[in-house]
């Protein structure tokens, strides 16, 4: 009995660790607090990280057919705890299709952007209003794809078990997009929806598909249903909204519990001195660095002494690094 109790405690600790929230405390803003009530959506609510200096990334999410915001609301405190301001909206009529959900998302972006200029808002002058993301579940995920096609200022899409009336709509996806789905989705079967949307999204668009092993249509509704799903969403927003690729390798690595995982995303090399991005330091990097020095051009990967200039000192340091590895 003691052994069983011991392993139960270990399991609880392990689960609490891998499914843990981020480092920030989370607070909310409602329409009663002054949040704009947009005409094309209902029920706006914002989750945001407290006491963190921005500009903070923004994501607007919407649920699916006949579903309330509460069906996907776990994403709010989770993402906000990682520093991502997350707003939820819903359509004015829960029976409305993805096109109406697209309009609701775009109207939500107007509201959250106004928080950046509303003097009494806790997000006043602390939002990145120039790079934003939209997402949604089921018909909401379909609406998110349509919204990004209608607004070129949207920089990322999170499509959770998305549903569209016509898969050809995805042919116009030009915004980086993360597809999340469950293996046994009986509402929006992957072979009719998510898989086809991924395939129809042009290869010129960065895209990633993560199908959760054993999952269903509701699995994607909460980041606590799969730890990798939550973190990959955070990493995707980091890369395409915050222009931070520090976790890019983890983003594109197939997780343990995936029944399907596809991507065309290529991570830039973070190896200092690797100017030709082949993940090695060699004479080709020296040649590229010398060329940059001669034309007085700058690349921070080649700035080995961190003086914000490329010069002969960087060439010497790179040469020494290559020789020390041989």
Image (spheres, helix red, strand yellow):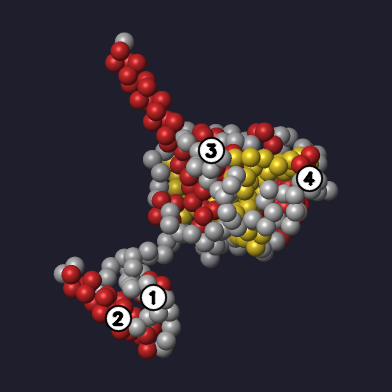
CB under 8 Å between discs 4 and 1: no
Q: Residue at x 43, y 54 (%)?
A: 247
CB under 8 Å between discs 1 and 2: yes
Q: Residue at x 41, y 64 (%)?
A: 268
Please state the horizontal and vertical placement of residue 162, each as a whole percent of the image.
Answer: 62, 45
- Would residue 193 be found to the left or right of residue 98 on screen? left
Instruction: Tell me which label, 3 or 2, sits earlier in the chain.
Output: 3
Q: Residue furthest bottom?
A: 294
Instruction: Tell me which label, 3 or 1, sits earlier in the chain.
Output: 3
Label placed on residue 307: 1
| Label 1: few (<14), some (14–19) or many (≥20) C-alpha neighbours in 10 Å | few
Q: Residue at x 67, y 57 (%)?
A: 125
Looking at the rendered structure, the secondary structure element under dot 2 is: helix
Looking at the rendered structure, the secondary structure element under dot 3 is: helix
Q: Residue furthest top?
A: 1
Image height of 259 relative to 323, above or below: above
Instruction: Tell me which label, 1 or 2, sits earlier in the chain.
Output: 1
Label placed on residue 66: none
Quadrant for the C terminus in the image: bottom left
Q: Which residue is mark 2?
A: 313
Instruction: Tell me which label, 4 or 2, sits earlier in the chain.
Output: 4
Q: Which residue is mark 4?
A: 34
Instruction: Tell me which label, 4 or 1, sits earlier in the chain.
Output: 4
- Looking at the rendered structure, the number of numbered marks drawn on it comes to 4
Image height of 245 relative to 213, above or below: below
Label placed on residue 223: 3
* The one of 312 and 144 positioned closer to us in this rendering: 312
């Amino acid at each position: 009995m003691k052994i069983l109790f011991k392993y139960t405690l270990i399991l609880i600790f392990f689960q609490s660790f891998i499914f843990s929230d981020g480092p920030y405390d989370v607070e909310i803003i409602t329409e009663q607090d002054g949040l704009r009530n947009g005409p094309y959506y209902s029920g706006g609510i914002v989750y945001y990280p407290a006491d963190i200096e921005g500009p903070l990334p923004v994501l607007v999410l919407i649920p699916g057919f006949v579903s309330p915001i509460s069906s996907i609301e776990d994403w709010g405190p989770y993402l906000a705890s990682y520093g991502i301001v997350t707003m939820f909206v819903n359509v004015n009529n829960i029976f409305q299709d993805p096109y109406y959900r697209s309009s609701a998302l775009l109207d939500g972006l107007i509201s959250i952007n106004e928080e950046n200029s509303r003097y009494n808002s806790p997000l006043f002058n602390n939002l990145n209003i120039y790079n934003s993301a939209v997402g949604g579940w089921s018909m909401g995920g379909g609406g998110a794809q349509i919204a990004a096609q209608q607004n070129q200022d949207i920089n990322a899409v999170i499509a959770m078990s998305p549903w569209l009336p016509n898969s050809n709509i995805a042919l116009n996806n030009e915004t980086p997009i993360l597809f999340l789905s469950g293996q046994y989705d009986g509402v929006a079967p992957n072979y009719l929806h998510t898989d086809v949307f991924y395939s129809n999204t042009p290869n010129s668009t960065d895209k990633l598909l993560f199908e959760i092993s054993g999952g269903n249509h509701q699995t994607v509704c909460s980041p606590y249903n799969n730890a990798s799903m939550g973190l990959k969403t955070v990493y995707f927003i980091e890369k395409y909204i915050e222009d931070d690729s520090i976790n890019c390798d983890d983003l594109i690595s197939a997780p343990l519990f995936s029944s399907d995982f596809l991507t065309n995303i290529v991570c830039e090399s973070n190896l200092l001195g690797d100017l030709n991005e082949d993940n090695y330091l060699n004479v080709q990097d020296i040649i590229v660095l010398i060329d940059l020095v001669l034309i007085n051009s700058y690349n921070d990967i080649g700035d080995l002494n961190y003086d914000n200039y490329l010069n002969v000192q960087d060439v010497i340091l790179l040469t020494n690094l290559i020789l020390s590895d041989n």
